[in-house]
Amino acid sequence: MVKFKPLLVAPLVFLTGCIGDHSDLELFVTTTKAQHVARIPPLKETPKFEHFAYQAELMRSPFVPPSRELTEEVIDTSKDCLQPDLKRRKSRLETYALDNLRMRGTLSEDDEIWALVETADSSVYRVGQGEYLGLYHGRIAKVTPKYIEILELIPDGSGCWAERPSSLELSGQ
């Protein structure tokens, strides 16, 4: 008696389904190819290469960090113009840009109102009128239940500074 091994018989059974008449499939493929012609738009003409001579002998290399003098704020005390108070001790909120701060609510007692400000690292601070926040010596001019009015000092490049109004609005997120 001959024993059949199931592992050898199974592939033979599956291969028998591949033998047969495929004329209907071949007809379908040929008619589909004839009816559906691919329309590929032509490629755009490549732009002409224009050589640019990079002459940076007098400029700082973009791969070297700028020197400390170039990144420090220019403050000229000899000029009689608006200047920030450099002797004032900076608060913790002056290490954050205004877009990294969110007003989360207010607290009030009698006529005084404070704002709750959240930083990017999820710390919450209570601030009031006259306090500072932001990178540009931003002094809080007014606190309301809906927003904080801020006056920032922006350097004008000539050693003087200009006031720029800004605000933080109450955010529920």
Image: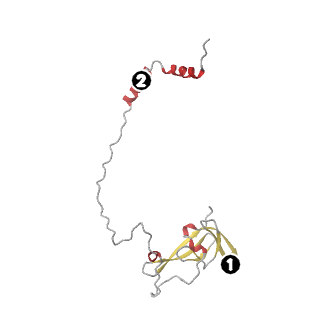
The residue wearing badge 1 is 111
* Residue at 57% in and 69% down: 168
- Residue at image point 54% right, 22% down: 11
Horizontally, is 47 left or right of 86 in the view? left
Question: Sequence order check: which comes first, mark 2 or mark 1?
Answer: 2
Q: Secondary structure at mark 1?
A: loop
Nearer to me, 100 or 152: 100
Cα–Cα span, label 2 and label 1: 88 Å
The answer to which quarter of the image holds residue 3 is: top right
**Other-residue count near label 1 (Cα within 10 Å), few / some / many at <14 / 14–19 / ≥20:** few
Whole-percent x and y of residue 100?
A: 56, 67
Q: Are marks 2 and 1 in contact (CB under 8 Å)?
A: no
Under mark 2, the amino acid is Glu
Front disc: 2 or 1: 2
Q: Name the disc covering residue 26, or none.
A: 2
Residue 76 in picture, x, y percent from top left? 46, 84
Pick the quarter of the image with the C terminus. Answer: bottom right
